Each structure stands twice: as C-alpha cells, then as structure tokens.
Amino acid sequence: MITAFRDAWIVTQNANRDVIKGDVVVDGERIVSVGPTYNGTADREIDCAGDVIIPGLINTHTHIAMTVMKGVVDDLLFPDFLDKTFKIDSDRTDADLALGTKIGCMDMALSGTTTFGDFYYSEEVIAKATQEAGLRGVCCWCCLDEDKTTQKGNPVQNCKNFYQQFKNERKIVPGVSLQGVYCCNEETCVEANAFSEEVNCPITMHLSETRGEVNAHKQQYGKRPAEWLSDIGVLSSRMITAHSAWLTMREIKLLGEAGMSISSCPASNMKLATGGVAPVPEFNKYGVNVSLGTDGSTTNNTLDMIAEMRLLGLLQKSSRWDPTVTPAQELLDIVTINGAKAIGMQDQLGSIEPGKYADLVVLNGKDPNLRPLLPQNIIANLAYSMESHNVKTVMCQGDIVVENRNILTLDRDEILAQSEDAWKALCLR
C-alpha cells in the first residue's frame, strides 16, 4: 500500500538537518520519497497542509508494564521506594503486565513515541502486548544474580530463551538488560554481555544512578561501577546505560572509548531526588552517544518523551548556568537519531529518508502553541513549545497507530476500564 502525506513541513533529521515543504510517500513499511509534490498515485492520501512531520521519537529506557502502578510509590525516600516497588513486582501476573504495557503504548503513541527500550522480566508478555499496540519494542530481559531474583530459573538463561522466541518477530527487538552492579556480580555481567555479543543485540543496564550505589560498589570492589565494568570487558557499543549521573571524567572517557550510549532520565532522577545531573556536554565531548528515557511510571508517572526532552534541555541549562548547552537541534537529535543509534538501528530509524522505516509523527500545525510556524523557528518550537496534544497521526513501520488522536490498534475504552481494578489488586495490600 502506498500512503502519501501531503503538503507538510518535513523535519527530516537527515545529515544536513533539512527542513522542507512537501510530501512524504510510504510504500508498505518504508519511506520511498521525501520532498516536492509527489505526482504518483497513492492508495491513501493524508492531508497535512500546515502540519509538521517529524520522525517517531525513541524512548531508550522505560519499564512500560509499570503503568498500572502509578501513584503507589510516590514521595518516598529511595530505599523505601525500592523496597515497596520490589514487593509489588514480585506479585505481578501476565494479565496485569499485558494491561500495563497496552496502557503505556497508548500513552507513548499519543505523545509521538514509536520505539521504546524496555527493561523488565516476563518480556514475552510485554512483547506480545506491544505487537498488539503496533509500536516497536526493544524488549530487554532483566538479568541479575540467581540468588537475588524472583524469576523462576536462571535469569540469563531466561533471557536467552526469550531472545530465541522473538528474534524474528516483526517490530520486536529482543535484548538483554542487567539490573545493576548492586545485584549483578562479575559472572552475571560477563555471561549476559557475552550473549549480547554472540547474537549482536542491545544490552542495557542501570548505572551510577545514585551516589549510594557508587560508594557501596567502590567500598566492596575498590573501583567505581563504570571502571569495574570496563575492567571486566562489559562496556561496548551495544550497551545503553540508564541514568549515569554519578560519573567521573575518567569513567566518561571509558564510556566514550567503548562507543557506548547513555539514556538520561531527568524526570525520574529529579522525582526520586537521587541528585546529580547527567553530564551531557562531557558525554558529547568524549564521544558518548546521548539518548533519552522516561524511566517507568513509578518514577516519572508519564511516558511523554516530548515533555522529557524539554525537561532535559532546561535542566542542563539551569544546572550549568549556561543557556547555550543542549540547544534545540541537539535536543531533537537526542530523541530521534541518537536514540536510533543507541539501539543499533541508525540505518533504519531516526530520520525521514527514503529506505528507512516509515516511523512518522504528524503534528497539528494549527495548534496555537506551535504558532507562528516558520522554517526559521520550527526546530525551536519542537524543542521548547511542542506538547503531546499536538500529536495528530502516528505511523510505525508503515502501520497507522494513531489517526486524528484516535488509537486504531487497541480498544482504548475497554483497556482503560480495567486499569483501576488492576491497580487495586496490586497496590492495595
């Protein structure tokens, strides 16, 4: 099927960062034409006059199934937050995991996200629900030491089994996640990384999220977490570390030398008051690829990447006393092409170019918060003025998931009607 998006402002995010007026044409799953008026015939015509088309946003760190846990662990000290969260996590069922995933997918789709990196156990349930929703999930099975998990069996073997089950599934990228150095010993880290290297899949982990995590690890091993991971050979270009706010310059250089990516999660870190601000300018200086994540709905409460992008920019400027850091174009890069690079899909996603997957978000250019709208201010408007309600239509790999703010892939009312009972069953204990 050929779909033509007509007469839009197209923010291509190509190598030249071209912003052009014209049409985007999709044949099946992929973009075939970007530019002036398309004179061919199309099976489906979408009028985008006055609207803006951007690449689908990429959320590189979340725990999507936790959307049914909103509001139960708010306003707690970090140790108390972890304790209560882990207790709820241990009692979850496939039904509420699937429900949480579908609610999260709707939240993301309606705020312009087409691809997300997930970090949890029972990823087979999450992957199937994601397929129903029509988004792309980079589903990374959580690995940790066997004596520290509630999973049945060995977590790394569970991850391997999951990978084999989903490695050829459409719009699902199975991967590996390590909970963190505080519950992953050297054997677990090395084995999980070796599997990631063997099958060439993404691997992600929480790293240096809190000062306490860093200090405890240094006391036990005599090294800071990133130094230790480097010494045991786990850092690589396949790895995305989440949070990564408590790092020294030496550690940043080690990440850069390994060709790694980080996923900054500013809202989560601020809400949990874990302190520290991800050193984005230094990451850029030493070659660390910066991407962005919302984290889960217990630490952020929303999966809105548009809001997260703006928050990242403002936090970096404020904490540095420097309004020139993370300029508008860099912020847009972080949530598109940088995100694609982090998950190893830079040749397929992140920009609007012929040959890439058709992950497209149409923004309502008639909304007041985006006006005035000119080539000279479009990028600034996207970084600092855009809001989730501007999202009008969303396509993921050629499938229209949202049309005129209506979810097409899921029964929105039926799913949301189950959410309160699921919350009560999990959280009222």
Image (cartoon, helix red, strand yellow):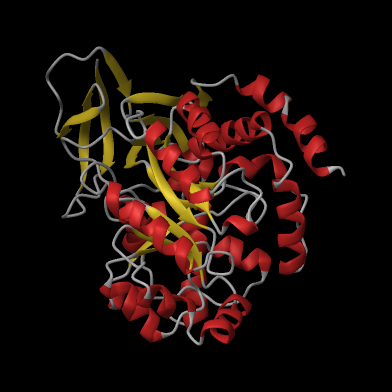
Question: Vertically, is 311 above or below 24?
Answer: below
Q: Is residue 115 visible?
A: no
Q: In which quarter of the image is residue 396?
A: top left
Residue 239, percent from left and from top: 36, 60
Q: Which quarter shows the N terminus?
A: top left
Front in this rendered view, residue 374 or 288 = 288
Q: Can residue 165 be seen in this view?
A: yes
Residue at the spot 52% in from the left edge and 24% down from the top edge: 407
Residue at the spot 71% in from the left edge and 44% down from the top edge: 69
Furthest-right residue in this view: 429
Q: Is residue 301 left or right of residue 74?
A: left
Residue at the spot 60% in from the left edge and 51% down from the top edge: 296
Residue 320, percent from left and from top: 47, 81
Question: Vertically, is 407 above or below 228?
Answer: above
Question: Vertically, is 254 above or below 312?
Answer: below
Residue at the spot 25% in from the left edge and 45% down from the top edge: 351
